[in-house]
């Protein structure tokens, strides 16, 4: 049994973590927690970490003892510099809380890149966790809606940069902007995105922990995440009855099922496919052949097969060689920073000019 | 020194050579002196005479020059003690044949001292300086004093260095700290009238700390110690201020020196005391005890203190209708170790229905602790209550379960 730790940082990370806990109850609605027990596909410990106590209060499916408030009331207001300081000040507390939960083989850190708390804690946590545990560390980074403004873009740019510098085993991107299509309003878009991310993560954990034949393990995960620039995302496809396994597998590479916009065939470096479904639909020969074909385009492809009742589902996980969408995000961030700077200087100059009017004058009463 | 004396005796030729070399050097540099003197760089001659060790002159009622010592070594030399108004005493060693040595007075005027020759304890001193400066007085060595001692002593300076060490830097209240001073006289004169000022630390007592010390000769080291008793200093980290030494030279000049400061951490004394706690648990199948039925009660005594307890006696207070059916309700324990516990079970019977309170005391040393437990006893009318119980229990459990879950998930 794998020991897995899932950390949800900041509001976004907390809420996705709550979704994971909710899914572990079977995703059966608000009251499930009163009558059923959580079923994780491995030994999973979760901790929601936040500076904003209200965000923690808003969670529903995460045990109170798994919600950890870092004492700096009401968040850090998207200020990463402040966030880092708060982390430093509370490092021992946070690491102590994690340490209480034993040791781990795999650690997921879930955070938005645009906020203050999560995005500043994540890189520091990677560093601390790497020093403290011999575990694989995968970051799940949620990118903002592009219209959220320049601070979000800046934070994202610096957060991803610092994350990469800390060298976790991999970074999986989830793009709010790209997934907006799921729902009309932001609130239900969040819920949808969170539930989707949660389900895929649990699917991945299940496959890694499974002891069935032809499964993928932590070593495969490491190799996949090590591909390309170490950044990737996840795709998913569930077959409508009658689809061949091949169609289902290819479906999981379709942009519509990805959590971040990418052209897997063009930009993919390495991939892992987890195929779950009824024995009678899982034609192993066809699976092998399909994967062979894919390997010519995507590079090394690992596969895992889980035999379970129900419709066939495929989860794809891959790393990318190049990420045009991220490049353009960095370009916008740089633009935003420059504009901000010019604006600031402008306002300062105007203020100085205004002050100049009363220079050498004394007030008269 | 002994080595050199031997040299002189055993190798007269070597000494002769050295002399020759010296003479050569002097011959070489003497023209320079001549030129310098001739050019008037050193001013007009004020004095040129033989002075014995202990003798001296005074110039212009201000500058005092006294012969302290002479030495007829490789190069002959004489040592002078020179002082003047507002200028600290200077010791000057002047070698025969050297360039005139400059001495500057407070006003900036300069005089120059030159040793022309040395014979035994007599040096021929030449002083030059500003025009019109005159010798205004003479000293003479007091014949009664032996040799050159008094004059030499007049210029000795004691210099005490004090080091303070504590044998522990972290103490508990009530403990003793041994404070040791190592006092060394680095000067060239005896230190006398030494007064030691050891600052007090709040809540401590200095046992045997001397206020004065005996004389310390030049070069000597003295060790002094005393016990610092930590009486009721609150726990914390303290800075022990430096020890101050005030002392005098034999000529009466005052000096002082101080040790560096030390830090001392005082921790509260750990009190070792046993502390017993008693707990009673009454177990009944369905939270109800039936009159006349035996039911178990567990009594547990925990030692939550940090020392082993002595004899612990247990006393019970049972309601009138409650009896002990089996077991000893009031055992005695000879000792319970810290962190350890004793537990025993007795069977009780209650005869009357209603609320019952059992009180238990545990007594040890001159202390006691008590606990009580409550239970309800009911007449055995199973038939009447059975359906209710059947319904209430699962619902109760369900509610308890839901409440517990709710608690677990509310933050
Ligand atoms: N997918 C998803 N994104 C969210 C959710 N909540 C917030 N976000 C995104 O997260 C970013 C804001 O970061 P937060 O996580 O709220 O910030 P934080 O880490 O709590 O930091 P501070 O509030 O600044 O202390 C924005 O890009 C939001 O769009 C959520 O429930 N789901
Ligand atoms: Mg927040």
Image (spheres, rainbow, N blue to C red):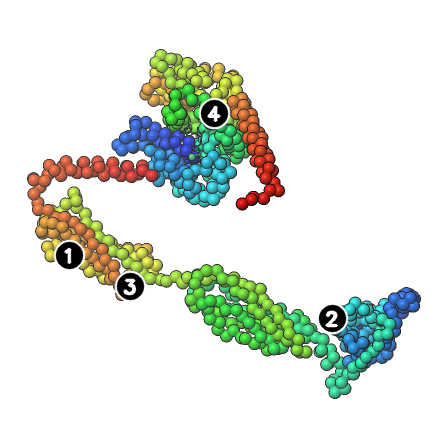
Query: How far apart are labels 1 and 4 at the CA level?
Result: 75 Å
Name the quarter showing ligand 1. top left
Q: Chain of mark 2?
A: B
Q: Secondary structure at mark 3?
A: loop
- Judging from the image, mark 1 belongs to the subunit labelled B
How many residues crowd mark 1 within 10 Å: few (<14), some (14–19), many (20+)? some
Identify the image quadrant of residue B319.
bottom left
Q: Secondary structure at mark 4?
A: helix
CB at mark 3 closer than 8 A to ligand 1?
Answer: no
- Mark 4, Cα crowd under 10 Å, few <14 / some 14-19 / many 20+, is few
Quadrant where the C terminus of chain A sits is top right
Q: Secondary structure at mark 1?
A: loop
Ranked by sequence position, the earlier of labels 1 and 2 is 2
- State which quadrant residue B104 falls in: bottom right
Per the image, the residue denoted by label 2 is: B87
Mark 2 touches mark 3? (CB < 8 Å): no
Report whether residue B280 is seen: yes
Q: Position of residue B368 (x, y in %)?
A: 25, 61
Q: Are marks 4 and 3 in contact (CB under 8 Å)?
A: no
Indicate the position of residue B217 as horizontal and vertical percent values.
65, 76
Where is mark 3, residue-wise?
B310
The residues bearing labels 4 and 3 have C-alpha atoms spaced at a distance of 75 Å
* Distance from the alpha carbon under mark 4 to that under mark 2: 83 Å
Please give the label number shown on residue B318: 1
| Label whose residue precedes the other's in the sequence (1 or 3) | 3
- In the rendered view, would you say B46 is above or below A92? below
Taking the spot 62% from the left edge, 71% from the top edge, the residue there is B256
| Number of other residues with Cα within 10 Å of mark 3, as a class: few under 14, some 14 to 19, many 20 or more | some
Give the foreground label among 1 and 3.
1
Mark 4 sits on what residue? A147
- Compared to residue B369, the image places residue A120 above or below, namely above
């Amino acid at each position: 049994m794998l020991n897995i730790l899932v950390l949800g940082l900041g509001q976004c990370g907390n809420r996705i973590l709550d979704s994971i806990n909710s899914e572990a109850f079977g995703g059966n609605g608000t009251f499930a927690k009163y009558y059923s027990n959580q079923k994780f596909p491995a030994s999973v410990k979760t901790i929601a970490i936040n500076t904003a106590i209200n965000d923690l209060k808003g969670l529903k499916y995460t045990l109170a003892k798994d919600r950890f408030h870092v004492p700096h009331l009401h968040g850090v207001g998207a200020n990463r510099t402040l966030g880092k300081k708060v982390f430093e000040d509370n490092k021992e507390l946070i690491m102590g809380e994690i340490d209480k939960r034993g040791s781990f083989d795999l650690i997921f850190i879930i955070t938005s890149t645009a906020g203050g708390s999560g995005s500043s804690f994540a890189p520091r946590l990677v560093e601390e966790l790497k020093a403290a545990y011999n575990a694989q560390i995968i970051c799940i980074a949620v990118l903002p809606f592009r219209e959220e403004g320049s601070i979000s873009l800046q934070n994202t740019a610096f957060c991803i940069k610092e994350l990469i510098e800390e060298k976790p085993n991999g970074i999986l991107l989830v793009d709010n902007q790209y997934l907006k299509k799921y729902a009309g309003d932001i609130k239900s878009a969040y819920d949808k995105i969170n539930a989707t991310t949660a389900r895929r993560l649990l699917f991945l954990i299940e496959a890694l922990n499974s002891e069935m034949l032809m499964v993928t393990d932590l070593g495969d995960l490491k190799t996949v995440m090590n591909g390309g620039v170490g950044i990737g995302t996840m795709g998913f496809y569930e077959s409508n009855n009658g689809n061949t396994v091949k169609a289902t597998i290819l479906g999981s590479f379709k942009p519509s099922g990805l959590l971040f916009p990418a052209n897997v065939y063009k930009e993919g470096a390495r991939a892992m496919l987890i195929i779950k479904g009824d024995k009678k639909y899982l034609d192993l020969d066809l699976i092998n052949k399909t994967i062979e074909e894919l390997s010519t385009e995507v590079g090394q492809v690992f596969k895992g097969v889980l035999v379970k009742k129900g419709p066939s589902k495929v989860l794809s996980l891959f790393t990318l060689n190049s990420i045009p969408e991220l490049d353009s995000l960095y370009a916008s961030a740089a633009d935003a920073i420059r504009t901000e700077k010019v604006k600031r200087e402008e306002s300062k100059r105007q203020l100085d000019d205004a002050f100049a009017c009363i220079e050498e004058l004394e007030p008269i009463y | 020194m002994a080595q050199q004396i031997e040299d002189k005796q055993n190798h007269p030729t070597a000494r002769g050579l050295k002399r020759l070399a010296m003479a050569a050097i002097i011959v070489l540099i003497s023209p320079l002196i001549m030129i310098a003197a001739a050019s008037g760089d050193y001013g007009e001659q004020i004095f040129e005479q033989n002075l014995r060790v202990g003798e001296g002159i005074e110039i212009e009622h201000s500058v005092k020059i006294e012969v302290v010592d002479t030495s007829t070594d490789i190069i002959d030399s004489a040592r002078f003690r020179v002082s003047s108004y507002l200028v600290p005493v200077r010791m000057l060693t002047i070698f025969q044949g050297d360039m005139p040595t400059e001495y500057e007075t407070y006003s900036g005027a300069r005089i120059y001292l030159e040793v022309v020759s040395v014979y035994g304890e007599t040096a021929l001193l030449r002083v030059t300086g500003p025009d019109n400066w005159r010798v205004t007085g003479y000293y003479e060595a007091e014949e009664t004093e032996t040799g050159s001692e008094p004059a030499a002593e007049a210029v000795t300076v004691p210099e005490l260095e004090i080091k303070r060490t504590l044998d522990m830097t972290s103490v508990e209240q009530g403990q003793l700290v041994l404070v040791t001073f190592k006092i060394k006289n680095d000067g060239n004169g005896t230190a006398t009238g030494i007064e030691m000022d050891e600052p007090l630390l709040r809540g401590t007592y200095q046992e045997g700390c001397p206020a004065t010390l005996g004389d310390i000769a030049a070069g000597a080291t003295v060790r002094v110690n005393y016990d610092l008793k930590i009486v009721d200093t609150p726990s914390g980290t303290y800075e022990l201020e430096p020890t101050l030494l005030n002392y005098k030279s034999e000529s009466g000049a005052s000096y002082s020196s101080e040790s560096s400061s030390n830090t001392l951490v005082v921790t509260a004394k750990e009190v070792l005391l046993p502390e017993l706690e008693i707990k009673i648990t009454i177990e009944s199948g369905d939270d109800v005890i039936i009159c006349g039925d035996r039911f178990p009660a567990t009594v547990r005594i925990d030692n939550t203190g940090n020392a082993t307890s002595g004899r612990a006696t247990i006393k019970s207070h049972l309601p009138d209708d409650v009896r002990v059916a089996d077991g000893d309700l009031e055992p005695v324990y000879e000792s319970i170790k810290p962190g350890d516990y004793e537990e025993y079970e007795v069977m009780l019977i209650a005869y009357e229905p209603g609320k019952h309170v059992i009180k238990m005391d545990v007594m040890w040393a001159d202390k006691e602790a008590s606990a009580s437990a409550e239970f309800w006893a009911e007449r055995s009318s199973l038939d009447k209550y059975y359906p209710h119980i059947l319904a209430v229990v699962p619902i109760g459990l369900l509610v308890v379960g839901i409440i517990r879950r709710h608690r677990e998930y509310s933050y």
